[in-house]
Image (cartoon, grey):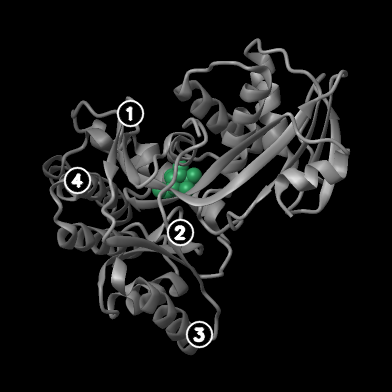
Amino acid sequence: MTIEESFQQMFSSPPEVMVRAPGRVNLIGEHTDYNDGFVLPAAIDRAISYAGRRRTDRRVHVFSIDFNASVEFSLEGVQRDSQHSWSNFLRGVSKFLEADGHQLPGADIVFGGDVPREAGLSSSAAVEVGAVAFWTKLLGLTLDPVYVVKLARRTENEFVGVPCGIMDQFISALGRRDHALFLDCRDLTYRHVPLRADVKVVVCNSGVKRALAQSEYEVRLKQCQQAVAKIAATGLAVESLRDVKLSDLRAARGVLTDLLWRRAYHVVSENQRVLEAVRVLEGGDLERFGALMNASHNSLRDDYEVSSKELDALVELARKQPGVLGARMTGAGFGGCTVNLVRADAAEAFAQAVGRGYQEALGLNAEVYICRASDGALVPA
Ligand code: GLA
């Protein structure tokens, strides 16, 4: 059943508006966004959709298809709901829109989709961006896209309580079909970079939920801040790891513990890899692009230490397959997915071989998605 049909069944009338916000896969630039750095994600062809209509009161009645549950809340004094935590994204978005002066009507809403949860494909960002897009469309508002992205991220940071960077919400809102998006997370300037049709972005889901992801994510965030403070204390004018060059980092090695050095080295080298990756993608050198993806994984595994046994196994298997250009973990890590760049004519065989090999090696089932980069929620249909 489609979301529209579910709405019809639940509320006995067709929805007034429909919106769709995609999940994402990050091609390169991991754990750089909260360091003011560079990222290169793409929106995928898996999304969260909302269907809804106005009510005449100030109550929101929302049904989650994926949780097969519904809740009702008032727009007066929106609170977190620890029992139905899936509703907090919509609650937070509604609260912050109202706080910014957008008076919302009550609404009947159905939402759901096919972005796997806790798989590192940003289903939360899709739910948040979808919620902002839903209200925007229902009210006929024209909002600045960067405001929409920031509001979605603020919901995650301040209402849901996850201290993420801005990448996921940005790409879910502003991705473009058949393109990746090169984003400078400091000034939020961006450009779309075409993905060629002769290669496929293949995502392998380790099936392992991202246990530890949140606590370890916060630890990494703090370690980056500590490294910046130590480097700044040597007299360098740096506000974030974005400002640190490899030569600066080497010069400051003596003031960093081995752990902080490795964390900082990952971020500083990853930013350089993103800049080169964009250049070679635009120039058509996909072999080099793949090599940079491989180097990114190794750095996340060895220096940033956010990979896992399952992700490493998927990457090792991938690198042995014909037609593969590069393979790495994607997203926060500690479970979730890998992203692979594979020649289009080899993609199907790749998907099967990696699935089989993972089953043989670890006895686990990996879902494999051959993705097509798609439009973000704010791109007109
Ligand atoms: C999660 C966060 C992003 C980003 C990545 C790591 O997806 O939500 O902001 O930090 O991890 O690159």
Residue under label 2: 333
Does residue 219 appear anywhere in the picture?
no
Residue drawn at point x = 39 percent, y = 44 percent: 177
Q: Amino acid at mark 4?
A: Gln
Location of residue 63 (image quadrant): top right
Q: Secondary structure at mark 2?
A: loop
Nearer-N-terminus badge (4/3): 4
Q: Which residue is mark 3?
A: 359
In the rendered view, does 1 fall on the left or right side of 10? left
Q: CA distance from mark 4 to mark 2?
A: 20 Å
Are the two marked residues, 3 and 1, in contact with CB atoms closer than 8 angstroms? no
Reading the chain from its start, which is encountered first: label 2 or label 3? 2
Q: Residue at x 88, y 19 (%)?
A: 57
Q: Identify residue type, mark 2.
A: Gly
Mark 1 = which residue? 186
In the displayed structure, does residue 213 sit left or right of residue 176?
Answer: right
Marks 2 and 3, how far apart at CA: 20 Å
How far apart are labels 2 and 1 at the CA level? 23 Å
The CB of the residue at mark 2 lies under 8 Å from ligand 1: yes
2 and 3 marks in contact (CB < 8 Å): no
Pinpoint residue 267: horizontal percent, then vertical percent. 29, 47
Q: Position of residue 300 (x, y in %)?
A: 34, 59
Quadrant including the N terminus? bottom right
Give the amino acid type for the residue marked by disc 3 in the picture. Answer: Gln
Locate residue 157, reporting x and y percent.
57, 34
Dot placed on the residue nearer the N-terminal end, 4 or 1: 1
Outermost residue on the top side: it is 101
SS at circle 4: helix
